[in-house]
Amino acid sequence: MKTNMLLISVLLALDVAGQSLDQKEAPLMTQWAAQVNAENPLPEYPRPQLQREQWLSLNGIWEFTPAEAGEDAPLGKQLPRSILVPFPIESALSGIMESHPRAWYRRTFSIPKEWNGQQIILNFGAVDWEAEVFINGKNLGIHKGGYSPFSYDITPYLKTAGPQELIVRVFDPSEFGGQPRGKQATEGIEIMYTPCSGIWQTVWLEPVNRNCIDHLSVTPDVDSSTLKLTVRAPAADAETRVVVNILEDGKLVKKVSGFPNRQMEIKLPDPKLWSPDHPFLYGLEVRLMEGTDTVDEVASYFGMRKISVENVGGQAKMLLNNEFIFQLGALDQGYWPDGNYTAPTDDALLYDLQLQKRLGFNMIRKHVKVEPARWYYWADKLGFLVWQDMPTAQSYGGVPAQPYQYAQELEGMVRALKNHPSIAMWVVYNEKCGQDEINKTVSTADLVAMVKRIDPTRAVNQASGYDWYGVGDIADSHTYPAPRAIPGEPGQAIVSGEYGATKFKVDGHTWSSKHVLEVETEQEYLDRYKLYALTLSQLKEQSGLCGAVYTQITDVENELNGIVTYDRKAFKTDPDILREINLSVINKTLIEKQILPTSSRDPQQWHYSTEMPADNWFRAPLRSADWKTSEGPFASAGTPNIHVGTEWSTQDIWLWREFELGFVAEEDLEGLYLYLYHDDDCRVFINGVLAAELPAHRGYSYSPISAEAKKAIKAAGTNIIVVHCHQTVGGQGVDVGLSLLNYQPASDQ
């Protein structure tokens, strides 16, 4: 495996306008850390779907100091330390890299002279979790919500001349509060990570007229070739008009006029539809008019596409533009070793999506985090279907969740992101985090209904993993390591919200020595990935599985189950091979010929013993008279994911039976796999040769057969398969089959 090592030069000190910043170094740094410009970090316009030409970034070096509860604002006082905004306090790129639940930020700024006479809006992309804002000593209010944008009209509080003082108080209780926080925790289990506190998205100013556009609501209607557009302008009167230009590759294709604060239905001639393979985006120019005068003008974009869940052939399917497309993606945590919640640069943000495109994925599950608006812009532009999680509260521990705060932030997330064509699904809960506590006040059904009311155009997933309450469009299970298709209520599409998570390290690219590994070689890693893909393909064809999420795209801190290392410098295996595998799952049909069926559907006869047979029990000749005979599966009652054909309650069981291949070309044996359930440890022999030795596992899945065992198989004649399963803890069960597998293009079927 080739590892692309990049040297990172880290500046020890940066000096901007008399302020110095001590650059920190995390255990891992990305290649983009050295490209961060402290004078103007993340200089791109932060809100691509409501853009104005005039704006001023306030990113850069701010004054900083930790705070205590109840302190007065440090008005007119220089703070002793410096921080680089918009990087979280805990991040290396912030220059602080410490944990402070309370802190003060301060800076001064000047208003450009050409903005005189206009209203000045102060915008925050996001501050985690609570922000209190002061302009020239005036308290503008408190905003709660670590993932949502917010703004203030600061015009009344500006001085007529000279520098303006901006102070922000931040508070983030992490797991000691009940707010939505996703994977943030100061301590805890491996799957929780370093907190993100303070300003973590762009801060900027923009001038507007009193009568201005503050929001666009964009809803495509593919079936009627219509764009439904509402231009919100709170100060508009009866004389105010709206002029809309729709652009195709920069050329005007439609011009209409209407009124603000009313829905306009704009018919599109022969619309180009948006999809992962063809992510076409229309340009949108909107002008607010008073008579012949343009009082405000914004640029935006939209994609024409339809998301639906409908019955196809007796099964609920997730459809895109009225067609079924299997949605395959990775779990994307959105963490960076140097920037924490904030990507070092826009190129870094883009890279994470580009590498997932390179891997052949057509979907991303954005996991318990809301990204900056530019992340969704790149998802729109590159063509991803995004399953958007609500950031969890009470995440695997911590104080009880705050029900109304959770509902409020869920509503804010949906309203903020609903214009993005990439969003295909809203995920209300992940793995029951905070769900029980919130249900005491606001039920899961209430939250699903709220999301549907705000946005009826997308699928709503009540809970990825669990608990299910029979509401929403999706039945989403988490099974490790292999995926499964667990049905929910009638009419719900079946997805595997998490599977995989193979822990494998690349030396020189680990956050610390605190990690657990599951495989030691790249080949083992790739073999597992292939087997999970085969299982997905089988579930897609036989069980109606509509989509699946591999855990995960990158390592994060001590978690080493990524396809890519945490520093984004090395793939765990050849990405071109993974791309071929992923595209086969999405686009091709798995053809399975059962050589030896399991008993999962139709009972199969096996010879068995619960006492140790003779020394050569795995080799022929085996005499039926020395063994009992019964039907599989062999299991104890209550063991998950398997039914009982014959009760098995001892510590060990031995099984054997004969089988024939029928006519199979020698070259086709490459596609011969075991398909089995084993709880716990299992060994399989074919014609006396070890075919597989497997550790404890629950759930039916494919397993490769050793090259030596394949050579021992008789293409013509009778073969013997022998199985030993050993019970270690909990339930127990075993069921074994053999299948020949190959992919064919879906069009060939």
Image (cartoon, rainbow, N blue to C red):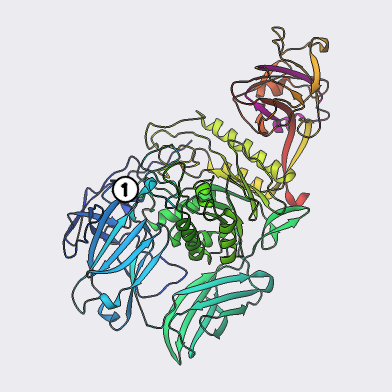
Say whether residue 425 is visible.
no
Question: Is 668 colored magenta in this rendering?
Answer: yes
* Direction bottom: furthest residue: 291
As displayed, is residue 614 above or below residue 584? Answer: above
Q: For mark 1, give the secondary structure.
A: loop
Q: Which residues are magenta?
A: 652-681
Residue drawn 50% across and 78% down?
231
* Direction top: furthest residue: 615
* Residue 194 horizontal/vertical position (percent): 37, 44
Q: Is residue 4 left or right of residue 673?
A: left
As displayed, is residue 632 above or below residue 269? Answer: above
The residue lying toward the viewer, choosing from 716 and 623, is 623
Q: How many marks?
A: 1
Tell me the quarter of the picture where residue 145 sits. bottom left
* Residue 731 horizontal/vertical position (percent): 64, 26
Q: Tell me the residue that label 1 is attached to.
A: 90
The three-letter amino acid code for the residue at tag 1 is Glu
Tell me the quarter of the picture where residue 656 sits. top right
The residue lying toward the viewer, choosing from 338 and 272, is 338
Question: Is 14 colored magenta in this rendering?
Answer: no
* Residue 158 horizontal/vertical position (percent): 25, 76
* Residue 741 horizontal/vertical position (percent): 72, 36
Label 1 Cα crowd, 10 Å radius (few <14 / some 14-19 / many 20+): many
Say whether residue 654 is visible.
yes
Q: Is residue 410 left or right of residue 546?
A: left
As displayed, is residue 571 above or below residue 661? Answer: below
